[in-house]
Structure formats: C-alpha cells, structure tokens
Image: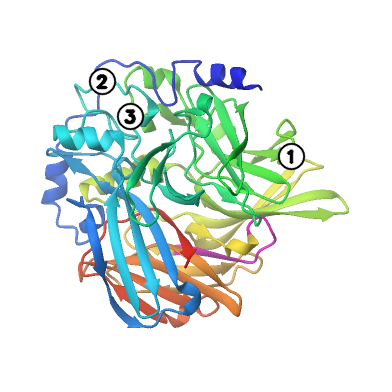
Amino acid sequence: MNRRDLLARLLAGGGVPLLAPWAAQAQAPADWQAQFEASSAPWKSAFATVPADLPWTAASVRGRFPDAVSGTLYRIGPAGHDLGGERYHHWFDGDGMAHRFVIDGNTVHHQGRYVATAKRLAEVQAGRRLTEGFGTVFQGRDEPSSPDSMNAANISVLPVGGDLLALWEGGSATRLDPRTLETRGLKTWRADLAGAPFSAHPRVDADGTIWNFGAHPHAGVLLLYEIGPDGVLRRAEALPVSDMPMVHDFVATARHLVFLLPPLVYDAQRRSAGASVLDSYVWRPALGMRVLVVDKTDWKQQQVLLLPSGFLFHLGNAWDEETASGTVIHLDYARSADASSVLKDTREVMRARLVGAPGPVLTVVSLHLRTGKATQADLGVEAEFPRIHPQRAGLRHRHVLHATKTNGGLPLWSAVASTNVETGVSQSYRHGTQAIVEEHVWVPDGRGPGWVIGTHLDYAQKNTVLSCFAADALADGPVAQARLSYALPLGLHGVFVAA
C-alpha cells in the first residue's frame, strides 16, 4: 500500500481514528465524583486526582541501590480523573502524568509532571471537561475535532531520538524532555501519518529497531511501523483486518510480528449512536482468539491461526524455534476468560468500587506455522504487567516478571512475582496487606542475573515506595527501598534508562 493509499484508507469510514457522529446520547448522569468521595474504601487514593505537578523531591532511602540501577525509572499513568466536579467513568480516561525516579546509590529523587496535551491545557483553562474520553461521554460537549483532541497521553513511555515519548493508543505520541518532563509537542512520524494511532506498547529489538502498530477501528486497519534506533521512520503500512478487535499489545520475534486478536469487536453503529469508544466494542466469543503472524521483512506475508476465545491486555515475549516440522513461535501472555476487566473492573474503580474479579492467568502458546495449529497452556499463576529481561526480547526466555495476587479484585495487585514459563515454578514477594503493586521492570547487570525495580502504593501510610530486588532472589525481599512522603495514584507502564 503506497502513501496515498494509506492516507486514503485512514481517512475512510468517518474521518480520523475513533471518531464518528453521534446524537446527544451520553452515559447516565450519575454523580461519579460524589460516589467516589462518599466511599470509605481505604485504597481509593490509588485513583485520586493529583492537583498539580509534583516538584523535584528527595525520597527517604533504606539500603543502597546497586550500581547497575543508577539511572532513571520513567513511569506514566492517569492522574487527572476529575475536573470541575465531574469525574471520568473509566480509569484509562485520566490526564497522563509522567514521573521520573532518579536513582544514584543511596539517593533517590522524584518528579511528576502532567503531560501538557492540547486537551489538558484547554480543559484546565476552561475548568471543565470539553470532550469525551475512552470510556466516558459527557452530555452537551463538543465532538472531538481529531483523535488528538481526546489524547490523554497516559499509558506508556518510550525513549527515542532524544525524546521521551508519552504514548496513548488512538493518536499521536507526545514528546517530552527526558530531563525535565516538559512537553515538547506531538510526534509526527511522516506528514500523512499526523494524528494516526500509535500504540503504547512498541517492541525494541537488541539492535534498537523499534516495531509498533496502531489500531484504527473505524477504518478497519492495523497500522504497522518500523523505526530505526535514531527515531527515524523506515516503513509504515496499513493492513486491513476484518471484525476489528481491541488490540492493546503485540510481540516481536527475530522474524515475526505476532498479534493476538481477542473477540472484543468494534461496532461502528454503536459509535454512531452515541456510545463511548469503549462501549462501541462488543464481546463476540464465537470468533475465538485469532492470531495474526506477519513476516518482519515482508508485511504482505501473513498467516492467521486460531486459539480459544479469551481476552488480554499484555503479552510477555515471543521467540522462533526451528524444528523438523517447521517454524514454531512460542509466546506468553496474561489471559482472561472474557473482557470484564476493561468493561467493568477498570470502570468501577472510578467510584471506588471493586467488582471482585480475579486477575488474568499467565498462559503459554505454541504456534505451528507449517500446520496452522495453535495450542496454549494455562500455568495457573495470576499475572498482569508481564515483563522480561530486555536483552531477551524476541529470543528464547524462561522467566517473566509480573504483578500477581489480586486483593479484593482488579486492579489491586498485592505482590510482584517471577515465573518460569517452561516449568511453571513461580516466586513472589508481597509488601503487605495494604499495598498495591504496580508494574516492575528488569534492569540488566553484566556481572549477574540483574535487578528488578518497581513501585507500590502503601495506602495505609499514604505514600509510594520504589523497591529494588535481586532478580534471582525476588522472594527474599527488597535490597533497597525509597519511600516518598506522598502517594501517587496508580500508574500503568514505565521504562528504566541507565545513567
């Protein structure tokens, strides 16, 4: 597909990503803000709004962070959940706040700064929400003029080409200064891709090549991106996908890009009738879980396999095995039986309520490309936010780092774990009964197996804690911790950059 065809496809079927006309049909006018404030849930600070940027502040450190961990942990997540007395109806709607934890031995400093998107700047100035979010449609508001007029820049971060990119799903990445977190503006990879969807889960090869995608539900296409280590776009093409599903993540092997397509399918008629983006998706389990495999060198070489119906947000890693019977792709992901996590659980927490659903389960998959057979096995370990050692990306791996052990329901994870995907053996560490674990990441160390760092919210003490573990002795507990004097709302994803 050439550039002109790509642009035409993107603009087909109602304009730009996620947009379609609707009548004045918004969600029921229940006072979510009042319900949140009236709740006595002890953990509700996890979903509270941060009133302003958080200045450079020293944390209280116990122990010493290893030399290999000297650097910066960047994190991001929704932090602006209400404005002008109105509260969003979904966790994923909140204005994004970027964080940096600067680690140097026995000192740790933190800074938090809202991403100054055009949306946030206009709404803060107006003192009210001006347009919709992913899961919220307010009555009597303007239709979004572009996908980026809804851009919350709140899911993940990617360091590339001198920028720290704050990533959303339905529109552009937003450029931040990695030293100050100041917003530099939108990232446009190519003129005809301005405002095109750019996923929050790029995959980075060992040589620094960046692979990513963007799901465009209204046009029914999946955009593919190949970006050099210097941040320069090499290729972008749009692949048509029937029954366009909600796609949040993917994996890259040495030779393939792999997408798990859950049967949560976009319905344009719902969107046109006034539904939010989220409520425009319909659960159709009869479709099963389609698996789309794309050759890295020739994107026209594609294969579709089928797994049993299920839902996912995140995958861990994938790798190619050459066998006597052909190529087999092995991958792992956090599988749920249905989509209630995004449709219910992550909505009800905006009212400080828990549905009580269990978490997804770590699941391993084998894709036999010659025969088209796909099999999977449940490892019996509750898991979300799977991460692997960055030097094993696209290669054979054994251990997946993840959050585990829900406490009262999603998304209240109480422990961090490491699970061997070949044996199913898992070790974990729980900070306490009043802690909510966030995503942890693996930090390489050339002298050993490396380190694990990540944050948790201590809602009893009303503060956030950064911990460091030996990667091969997670269950032994932290070797060092840095405690802030304040609590951060729960975030989503992050990345470590060595000093």
Rendering coords of residue 167 (x, y %):
43, 44
Instruction: Give the numbered dot on residue 297.
Output: 1
Rendering coords of residue 499 (x, y %):
47, 68
**In terms of secondary structure, where does tag 2 sit?**
loop
The magenta stretch spans residue 402: yes
- Residue 431 appears in the figure: yes
Query: Is 488 located above or below residue 295 in the figure?
Result: below
* Mark 2 and mark 3 residues within 8 Å of each other at the beta carbon: no
> What range of the chain is rendered magenta?
393-403
At label 2, which amino acid type do we have?
Gln
Q: Who is closer to the viewer here, 76 or 215?
A: 76
Of all residues, the one furthest to the right in this rendering is 324
At label 3, which amino acid type do we have?
Ser
Q: Residue at x 58, y 41 (%)?
A: 232
Q: Residues within 10 Å of mark 3 (few under 14, many from 20)?
A: many
**Picture quadrant where residue 389 is located:** bottom right
Residue behind mark 3: 149
Rendering coords of residue 57 (x, y %):
24, 67
**In terms of secondary structure, where does tag 1 sit?**
loop
**In terms of secondary structure, where does tag 3 sit?**
helix
Instruction: Give the numbered dot on residue 25.
Output: 2
At label 1, which amino acid type do we have?
Thr
